[in-house]
Image (cartoon, grey):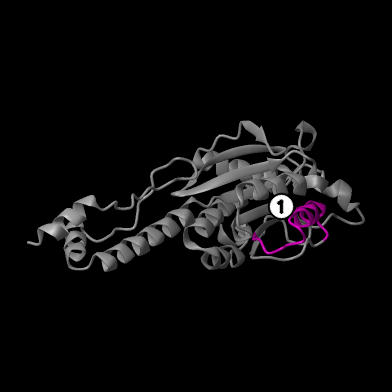
Amino acid sequence: MNLCASSSLLSMNFPRFRCCSFFSKPLSLISLSSSSSVITSLYSNQNSSAMAAEAAASITTEATKKKNEPWLIVGLGNPGKKYAGTRHNVGFEMVDAIAEAEGISMTSVSFKAIFGKGYIGDLPVILAKPQTFMNSSGESVGAIVSYYKIPLKQVLVIFDDLDLPFAKLRLLPKGGHGGHNGMKSVINHLKGNNGFPRLRIGIGRPPGKMDPVGFVLRPFTKQEREELDFTLQHGLEAVRILLLEGFDKSATVVNSAKKIEQIG
């Protein structure tokens, strides 16, 4: 054995690898070559080994960073008991259903929103219900996205839609506000960028000549509530699929779903 090479090896400073989690939860690292093969490589070619170590560190860092990037899931609605249980607040109800199912506490207030952090699977998520009133929802959403530097492709906004049949879900990768003032505010506070996914929950059209403003603030009937509860569970599964398996699969499941009376 070359003693000079051995001495050189012992004096080298090898890079240390660390994995930082967004919510301090351990994450699995990409498996690297065994230490014995690395040492053998170092004996034969220290320069090549250093390059390999640097490349491995880069791969590990990128993989960790990708897993550490949180999803932001926002439900739109109006704060206060006066609006609880109304059609305009189904976005809030969807976030509440996610929080309950995933064990995420929604007891803190931050960024003008009722706020919670947790996980869906091994992915970090932030849940938010803006408390700015519907038409100013973007003040809260824009601040959260900016502070946590969340990629827009990982911002899911959930809201009510008059143009969808009641209890129908529709998942889209991007789009305009469609006349929804809450979405208009969100897009404005994201500097006009509408390239983020959204989950629309149908609340149907108002009967007769009823004013849409009054209609969206009406509570649900008992029958509607039963159907909506089923829809919220379906939405929960859609969100899980979106985060863990990707947009395309989730959109296929959501957008091809039949109405409850067709399933039962």
Image coordinates for residue 225, horizontal then vertical, percent: 68, 44
Point 31% across, 65% down: residue: 52
Residue 85 lies, with reference to residue 62, above or below; the image says: above
Secondary structure beneath dot 1 equals strand
Residue 249 belongs to magenta span? no
Indicate the quadrant where residue 6 lies: bottom left
**Residue 206 location (% of width, % of height):** 84, 54
Q: Which residue is mark 1?
A: 159
Name the image quarter holding residue 187.
bottom right
Three-letter residue code for mark 1? Phe
The location of residue 246, given as percent across then percent down, is 51, 63
Q: Residue at x 61, y 31 (%)?
A: 107
Q: Residue furthest front?
A: 4
What residue range appears in magenta? 179-197
Which of 222 and 181 lies nearest the eye of the viewer? 181
Query: Is 181 drawn above or below residue 222 in the view shown?
Result: below
Work out which residue is located at the far left of the displayed protein and give it: 1
Q: Is residue 126 left or right of residue 189?
A: left
Q: How busy is the neighbourhood of tag 1: few (under 14 within 10 Å), some, or many (20 plus)?
A: many
Nearer-the-camera pick, 170 or 57: 57
Name the residue rendered at 21%, 61% in the picture: 38
Q: Please state, as top left, top right, bottom left or bottom right, where the N terminus lies in the image.
A: bottom left
- Position of 139 with respect to 101 (left or right) is right
Instruction: Give yes or no for residue 188 being in the magenta stretch.
Output: yes
